[in-house]
Amino acid sequence: MRFPISTTRVLASRRLNDNAFELYLERAPGFHFSPGQRLRVHWGAHEREYSIASSPADEHLMLCVRRVSGGTVSPLMAALSPGEPVQVSGPYGHFRYQSREHRAVFVATGTGIAPFRAMIADGCGAGESLVLHGIRSAKDLFYRELFLTGAGCYRACLSGADAPGGADIFQGRVTDYVAHHLAPGRYDFYLCGRQDMIRDVILIVDDQFSAARIFTEAFY
Amino acid sequence: MKVYTGSGDKGKTSLFSGERITKSDRRIAAYGDVDELNSILGMLTSVMPESLAERRAEVLTAQSDLLHVGAWLATTPGAAAADSLKPFDENHAAALEGAIDAMDAALPPLTQFVLPGGHMTAAWAHVARTVCRRAERHVVAAVADQPAADTTAKTILVYLNRLSDYLFVLARFCNHALGVAEARWNP
């Protein structure tokens, strides 16, 4: 299914770190989406899809974008100023929160955290979910306060050496946490990020959490 | 974008509704057949001449229908993921019935068994018909333990049954329209 392309405008842009930024866009009346769905950005002959990081309750749309060095679209998006037009369509995708039937484990790497920001902000799995955010360093800690208050449990999994202190900091990869620190149980895993992370988590889940359900959104 | 992920290397795969199941599961056999059928329909359309454009459009619609069928078969009934799926109703089977009736009106009466074959289009339609029948058998097995109230499963079974009928008539129609005599069975 393809949605018509429409023009929206930049409301604001906020730098998160050297490689990531938030882009706030006007939200057209009647634009409905579920947390976890994507917005397609049309830039000349190029198309890119980004998970919507804002809540459906917000008046605006917000994208959390990784600025790809040497990329075609993301560096141009990073340079956008308020008021500038952007061609978009959507929402796309079936990556959605399913139900509270089983405890949700949200696992992301980098800006793969975007759909989980939308879900937690919308109250999905409120108070009982686990958010695992795989990042390289403390500079990549996005949305920590939101997850600390909105999720049941939050762990920033730092693979680099400059891990700050805090009960919510885990020194290691998200796969280490799932393999060695997640209690036995029946979970719904939501995985978003690099394909190798998704594969590795799936293999661990197959071995250790046989009754789990897995929902994935891969970044390429 | 890499096509391979490696997450299925140990013999498991994910349903659309999230469960991890073995690739020998009956549901995988069922939608695997549906996938195979869809590929054969693709072969069929690729050999259809322009004079069969109307039939070709019907087959393309069937290919689209089968993607919806596969998605439903990959979703556990009642799962929240089913809300993302397009409803699969009886209109799809009804459309096939209309096409069957339209083709049948142009064909000579069938008085004896015909051998699968003839024009390339007819031959592929027969191959598709037999795979469709296999898909139907595997879907029956896959949904056998599902709730009786699962109306989508029933609708899919009706659809596959009707699609195999359509493909039989389509094979005859292709031979007739393209001037290739049907081979009769002489037991």
Image (cartoon, coloured by chain):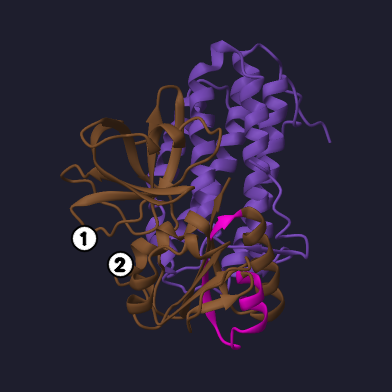
Which image quarter: residue A78? top left
Q: Is residue B42 above or below residue A163?
A: above
| Quadrant including the C terminus of chain A | top right
- The residue located at (62%, 35%) in the rendering is B168
Q: Is residue B151 visible?
A: no
Q: Is residue B93 above or below residue A58?
A: above
Relative to residue B45, is residue B181 drawn left or right? right
Q: Which chain did the renderer colour brown?
A: A
Chain of the residue displaying label 1:
A
* Of the pair B157 and A119, the residue shown nearer to us: A119
Q: Which residues are magenta?
A: A174-194
* Of the pair A26 and B106, the residue shown nearer to us: A26
> Residue B96: percent from the left, percent from the top?
46, 37
Query: What color was chain B assigned in the picture?
Result: purple
The label shown at residue A121 is 2
> Residue A176: percent from the left, percent from the top?
66, 75
Q: Secondary structure at mark 2?
A: helix
Total labels: the figure holds 2
What amino acid is found at the position of numbered circle 2 in the picture? Ala
| Quadrant including the N terminus of chain A | top left
Relative to residue A164, is residue B22 drawn left or right? right
Labels 2 & 1 near each other (Cβ < 8 A): yes
Q: Secondary structure at mark 1?
A: loop
| Residue where numbered disc 1 is placed | A57
Chain of the residue displaying label 2:
A
* Of the pair B39 and A53, the residue shown nearer to us: A53
Relative to residue B73, is residue B128 drawn left or right? right
Q: CA distance from mark 2 to mark 1?
A: 9 Å
- The residue located at (62%, 77%) in the rendering is A178
The label shown at residue A65 is none
